Amino acid sequence: MQPEPDELFARLKTLFQRATMGISTYGDASEIDKTLEQASQSLNKARQRYQDSEQRIRTLAEAIPIGLLITTEDGSIEAYNKESLRLLDCTDADLFHHNITNFLSDETPLQLVNREPLTSDNPASRATNCDQSGEFIIKKPNNQTFHCELIIRSFNDDSGQHRLILFQDITARHELQQVKEEFVSMLSHDLRTPLTSVQAFFELLEEGMLERDALAEQARRMNANVARLIGIINTLLDVYKLEAGRLEMFLELIPASTLLESSVQALDALAAQRNITLNMVPCSDDILVKADSEYIIQVLINLISNAIKYSPEAESVDIKAEANNRSVRFSVVDRGPGIPQEFKSKLFNRFQQVDAATARAKGGTGLGLAFSKAIIEQHGGAIGVESEPGHGSTFWFSLPQFVLDQA
């Protein structure tokens, strides 16, 4: 068994003392050589253990899905892991020896990384700096920003004071919170308001305050409110069923022209009411898709009704279907106000609206496009929008084309 380092050094000390005092015996020289060899082996093993330990720490630092930085007291970056490069969308040249404050937006308090040094006679400073955390905004070299959770811990070594900074992107958490807030807002306006109206109707009915002639008209309005509430709830449930893969679909071979005609017929009255002309571009009956006609018609109705709502009076909306590279592209073109670039990527998320106040005034819930996206993707298709502010919008979706010779 290999002797412990302390035992080896004690033995060497004894042998050298004996040699110095002139009382060494035969074999001491070989004993010294043997002990030195054992000490060298022990040192090599210790060095290997240290290297293995360092490698394990490096592997762990690279494996964790959290950005890790080590900075000097003044914020200069000395070390980092690959996740830091990914989160900050930068290169080694952007990070190494640059100051951490370069990545903090104006809203981030600089005292988090620029405080007085920790000292043993300053317990208040130690308590403040050793463990700090918070949510801040990080700025990438390309000036894009994201919400970030930051943890900062200070430590000392032989070269001075340093700071360990852990950070992770919490943009998704903020977006989820926004979705929750918008959902509550939608519940408040689109569900509570009609229910309050229905409740008021029944109170007037119970008190006998409605005249016979007005009763039928009021009942018709309440029936429309209840139908709208049921539609909102059904759409919301369908979106969640689709995302969970639990919405049952019945696929059939159907001409694209039939889908267009059914959708336009369903919205003729709404278009006439708003003085909007629906132009259905002729489509060959030979263009076929395999789809659940009820849900695809519902998607088309969502897109066309939105186009009607946001089009100026006396304008027109074009509806067409075109075959292209074994797919069928359905398009709804309006002459409305258009959509700013920053809203396009979020438009098909739940409860997202370009202008929530205007959407509510026009009867929007922010669910229609999310539902449409889920339906189209369930069919193996894609959906999107092409728009510029002031130049109208083209909402489109594509489905795989069914060619007769593939049957």
Image: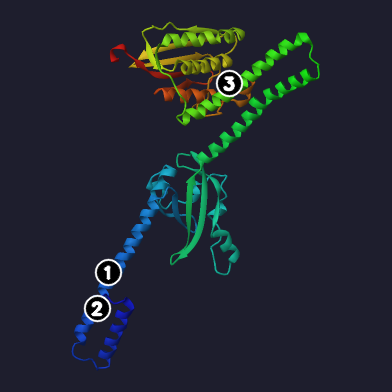
Given residues 346 and 315, the one toward you in this image is: 346
Q: Amino acid at mark 1?
A: Asn
| Above or below, 393 relative to 212 | below
Q: Are marks 2 and 1 in contact (CB under 8 Å)?
A: no
Q: CA distance from mark 2 to mark 3?
A: 87 Å
Tell me the residue that label 2 is attached to.
36
Which quadrant does the N terminus fall into? bottom left
Callout 1: helix, strand or loop? Answer: helix
Who's the residue at 42% across and 25% down the image?
Answer: 378
Tell me the residue that label 3 is attached to.
231
**Scheme of colours in the image:** rainbow
Callout 3: helix, strand or loop? Answer: helix
Who's the residue at 46% across and 42% down the image?
Answer: 140
| Above or below, 209 relative to 213 | below
Q: Residues within 10 Å of mark 2 (few under 14, many from 20)?
A: some
Would you say 337 lies left or right of 386 here? right
Who's the residue at 24% across and 94% down the image?
Answer: 23
User: Which percent across, then down, holds residue 180?
Assistant: 58, 35
Q: Residues within 10 Å of mark 3 (few under 14, many from 20)?
A: few
User: Which percent across, then down, holds residue 149?
Assistant: 52, 47
**Is residue 372 among the parts visible in the rendering?**
yes
User: Which numbered disc, 2 or 3, marks the residue that appears first in the sequence?
Assistant: 2
Given residues 376 and 273, the one toward you in this image is: 376
User: Which percent across, then down, holds residue 89?
Assistant: 42, 42
Q: What label sits on residue 318 in the rendered view?
A: none
User: Which numbered disc, 1 or 3, marks the residue that appears first in the sequence?
Assistant: 1
